[in-house]
Amino acid sequence: MMEKIMCPSMMCANFAALEKEVVALDQAGTDIFHLDFMDGQFVPNFAMGIQDLETIRKSTNKLVDVHLMIENPGRYVEKFAEMGVDIIYVHPESDPQITRTLDLIKNQQKKVGIAINPGTSVATIHELLPLVDYVMVMTVNPGFSGQKYLPFVDKKILELTALKADYAFKVMVDGAISPEKIEQLSKIGVDGFVLGTSALFNKDQSYEAILTELKK
């Protein structure tokens, strides 16, 4: 089994010492730093800012992704690309010209990701699968940390893992991802996990100890 991709959700980090957090997570074996951006419209919350991205980007050479939980994300693709992110996730639900936006991400020489809400079916995004490098399934309703995992999304994850070989994308999951969920979902073909308070942050162990154990 290939080693799974571990992506700390930086929304859950200690913002009073963000640079130190990034360095510690980098040294602990982080694969991708995951940053959530929210506009208070697509989701009823706000999270992270441009200065946070600047701090994280200058503090690590690891991959950085941005998850744009915002309306009409195509307006901001070039801005995030200029700031050095590696992967840009957008929601098909938020963009009336989603294929144009995905093409814009690709033209910026960035990896293309789509994130899909719990209520979004695989059928509605099937035509987009040849265009993307990552599909991130939200296993909670987006916008807030600390929610409970929604088990009905497992069927959708199974559908996507069955399709990924045909289209060469990776399946990621985000939301209430515990060590038990990592073990369970790894067995059905999930490639990577966004890690928040359920698995990584606010624990008694070091980041290195936790990430080493999770990657097993």
Image (tube, grey):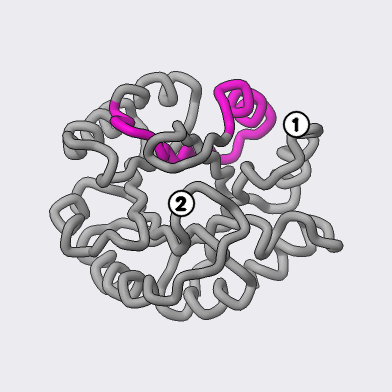
Location of residue 67 with respect to 77 vertically, above or below: below
How many C-alpha atoms fall within 10 Å of the one at disc 1: few (<14), some, or many (≥20)? some
Of helix, strand and loop, which one carries label 2?
Answer: loop
Tell me where the magenta segment starts and ends, as one range.
48-74
Residue 141: percent from left, percent from top = 44, 57
Location of residue 37 with respect to 163 vertically, above or below: above
Amino acid residing under circle 2: Pro
Pick the front one: 206 or 141: 141
Residue at 27% across, 73% down:
159
Location of residue 45 with respect to 200 vertically, above or below: above
Pick the front one: 199 or 167: 199
- First in sequence: mark 2 or mark 1? 1
Q: CA distance from mark 2 to mark 1?
A: 26 Å
Mark 2 vs mark 1, foreground winner is 2
How many C-alpha atoms fall within 10 Å of the one at disc 2: few (<14), some, or many (≥20)? many
What residue does disc 2 label? 142
Residue 194: percent from left, percent from top = 54, 56
Residue 46: percent from left, percent from top = 53, 35
Of helix, strand and loop, which one carries label 1?
Answer: helix
Q: Quadrant of residue 166?
A: bottom left
Location of residue 127 with respect to 40 vertically, above or below: below
Q: Is residue 120 magenta?
A: no
Q: Quadrant of residue 170?
A: bottom left
What residue does disc 1 label? 19
Amino acid residing under circle 1: Glu
Residue at 51% across, 39% down:
45
Q: Quadrant of residue 21?
A: top right
Residue 67 left/right relative to 3: left
Q: Residue furthest left?
A: 127
